[in-house]
Image (cartoon, rainbow, N blue to C red):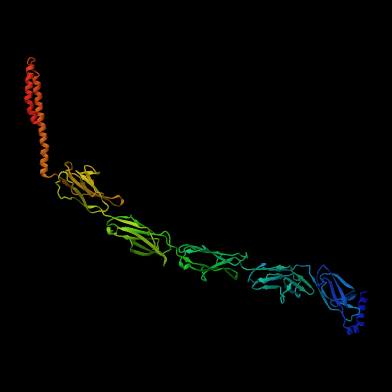
Amino acid sequence: MMTYVKEFCLLIFLRNISYLVAYGQSAEVVISQPRDGVIKEGEWFTLMCRYNNGFVTACWYKNNIYEDIAYQLRRKADSKTGGSYQCQNWSSSSRGETLKVVTIASDMTLTVQVHSTTLLLGETSVLKCSSYSWGFGRDYSFLWYRNNFLIEEEHEPEYTIAMARFSDGATYRCEQKLGFRKWISQNVSLIVKDLCSKPTLQADPDVEVFIGEGFNLVCLTEPFHENHPLLYTFYKNRDSLNFPSEKGSYAKEEATVHHSGSYQCEVTTRDSNLRKKSNIVLISIKRIPVSVPDLSAKPGNEVMEGDSTWLNCSVSRGSTPIQYIFYKGSQEIYWEYSNHSTTVHTIVNISKSQEGNYHCAVSNQEGEPLLSSKLLAVSVIVPVAGVFLKLRTNKTEILIGSSPVLECVLSRGTRPYFQWYFQQKALNNVSMNYNFSSDWRELAIESFQSQHIGQYQCGAINRGPSGMIFNVTSNPIDLTLPAQHHSAEMAALIVPLFLILSLLTLLSVKLRNRKKADSSSRSRQHREAMGNRAESKSEDRPARNFD
């Protein structure tokens, strides 16, 4: 039967040669399902022959070998289905155009192998089409597709992405073909990412940095690849400050003016030339404004004459160098530049002329006004010495009722206190008509009397540092009465005493006589009494005369 069908198709071909030559008509093979001519093994497909805009019964050929005569050729695809199909109509002198049917193998899985589906921007990656080999001598061919579009001129089992760009991020597959049979890999999606997000350089503190203070730079970024550790490099004025390291910060503990400049960080990785640079941060190192100074004296602001004192001018903050200036009053006495927060001015062998108000002033920036300390009063203590007591009248014999003045004269000594002595006893308050001046340098006797006669002295006392006490005593002065006044006064004292003693003697004699009269007889009492009266009368007159 098959032989008869073939001969029938041959007769049709020979009968219609002239007709086909004249009109040039031919049949066309159309695949109705699936329409692309690629069939997976195990699926059904249908071929139909179109002639003069219609479908006809035709003779079917596969690879120029007769297959069948039918209105449509329906088959289930297998490993042998692929080939070139033609159809020939009974009225056609030749076969129609060839339709190539390719089957997709189902007996193996083709894979695309890649080291990572996430590629680093600029990285080189190789995609390998891993296939099952059916033996030597087979003429395999390979095709590569990106986003379902054929990559032209790529027919090798490996496809290389050199210097990956963002556009290389796509879906890839490979196909392996042998004759009319091919194997298709599964899709592999590749993502091309940058090394990291754009780095951001931050400075802490970000407002201002003063000399001596520290600052810290932090390079902030988001890494996009776990297998590509980031390396950080910091730059100042385009000069690198460190070797690339995984530490994303850079610190400076004590800044100087030389650390001012423009800073930037760069992010790289070990296995790539890709570099990402941050924004530029300008850092200006400023001088710390100097604080108001404090002036002190050691061992203290009270100094013994001839000793030394140290004036200490200090500040609590301020960038160095600092200019220090010392003043006595408004006169500048010493200045210096120092890299320390304190400086000392020494006054050696101090004298009384160096006593006064001192202050210091500081500055650490040109053009800025000086800052001054509070005034410090320095006192020079001179021990009391050379005290001399003098009487303003220059005469030590004082008339009764006069007002002598004693003056305590001190040759040297600061802030003395005076003490007066009478008969080597201290006079601590106003008494016995003594009056003292406000500074106790003078002693005045309002009305000189005999109780004021005696020895006078004065003493001068002052204090030094640490509770030291200095005390000197003057020469003594003896105040007396003049010689005449002294004799008359003695006479005036002795005569009354003598009269009193005489009167007492007479009274004692009279009392004794009365006791004798009481011992006479009573008979003579009247006579004696009368006699006594007469006698007493005669004795009374001399007593009255004495008085």
From this view, report whether residue 511 is shown above or below residue 350. Answer: above
The x, y position of residue 157, in whole percent, is 71, 73
From this view, report whether residue 535 is shown above or below residue 39. Answer: above
Tell me how many marks there are. Answer: 0
Q: Quadrant of residue 172?
A: bottom right
The x, y position of residue 437, in whole percent, is 24, 49
The x, y position of residue 229, in whole percent, is 59, 65
* Residue lying at 20% horizontally and 50% vertically, measured from the top left: 407
Is residue 428 found left or right of 154 in the rendered image? left
Is residue 436 found left or right of 238 in the rendered image? left
* Residue lying at 10% horizontally and 44% vertically, measured from the top left: 483
From this view, report whether residue 39 is shown above or below residue 467. Answer: below
Q: Is residue 351 shown to the viewer in this render?
A: no
Quarter holding the N terminus is: bottom right
Q: Quadrant of residue 43?
A: bottom right
Is residue 51 found left or right of 184 in the rendered image? right
Front residue of 502 and 211: 502
The x, y position of residue 460, in whole percent, is 24, 50
Quarter holding the C terminus is: top left
Front residue of 335 and 378: 378
Front residue of 502 and 319: 502
Q: Quadrant of residue 521?
A: top left
Q: Is residue 201 shown to the viewer in this render?
A: yes
